[in-house]
Amino acid sequence: MPYRAATTTDVDFFREHGWLVVADAVDPADLGPLDRRCEEIIADKERQAYDWAWSNDDGADRTYRILQAMPSIGTTAFDATPYRLWAVEFASALMGFPIEHWYDQLLAKPAATSVPTDWHQDEAYWGRNLDDLGITCWMPLHDVDVDSGCMHFIDGGHRDGVLTHRRPEHIQSDLLVCEPDTSRAVACPVRLGSVTFHHSKTPHMTTANTTVPWRKVLTQHMRQVGNPGEGDHYAWKVWVEQFSGRVTRPADAR
């Protein structure tokens, strides 16, 4: 299956709205090795993953409401995959300058215990170094809808600046949330092979999974070529050692 290039319509829509659904973008046949790697992580989640919504009340027993891991850590197997090369090229067209792959994340939600991933902006985590210079490709490994945890965006929210974020009470992770104008929220259910892109300032969230055994999504986070990455952090930025709950703040947070 050929991977299509971004059109003028794609670019115009993305720059106006701050997000884009690209239907039938990725050949599902290319996702087999990635899906197997993600299944390995889920099967060995106690050693290979974090729970992004781990509660202080859970003690040492992680419930994995939002499983978070990086499939590419320790391997180059995914460096030249068609979906990654395509995402970088497509993202460069959407942003209007050269983009490079930065890091990926498996975000998986079990049906029994998952929770919504509340509204947030990527730049709130990354800091001012990525001011209008980041973009994310959200790629599910199966069909997703509102009941299984699809993406929602605030339409045009990338024009609202970085909103004030906070850590939710009782969460023993670096999870951040904000309160955007939800009257502009758009739900984006997609089928396997389709993806979404969003600007690093676009507020977004996903619903809880109440259907499939595990909702599995790969996020590909990308940045301007040569950008140093995270830095010049906002005052709410923290790092949390999940088992101890120890919280540290970047020296450059302000």
Image (cartoon, rainbow, N blue to C red):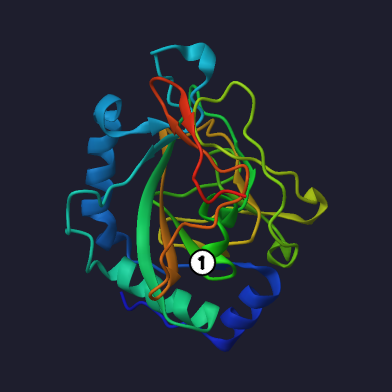
Using the rendered view, name the quadrant where residue 162 is placed: bottom right
Q: Is residue 196 above or below residue 175?
A: below
Left or right of 107, for residue 57: right
Residue pictured at 72% horizontal, 52% vertical? 163
Residue 66: give x, y in percent of width and height. 47, 33
Residue 136: give x, y in percent of width and height. 49, 62
Residue pictured at 49% horizontal, 29% vertical? 247
Using the rendered view, name the quadrant where residue 119 is placed: top right
What residue is disc 1 on? 134
Element class at badge 1? strand
Residue 235: give x, y in percent of width and height. 63, 45
Q: Is residue 215 above or below residue 81?
A: above
Of the pair 60 and 207, the residue shown nearer to us: 60
Of the pair 83 and 201, the residue shown nearer to us: 201
Left or right of 143, for residue 166: right
Residue 180: give x, y in percent of width and height. 76, 49
Counting other residues with Cα less than 10 Å from the Cα at mark 1, is it few (<14), some (14-19), or many (20 or more)?
many
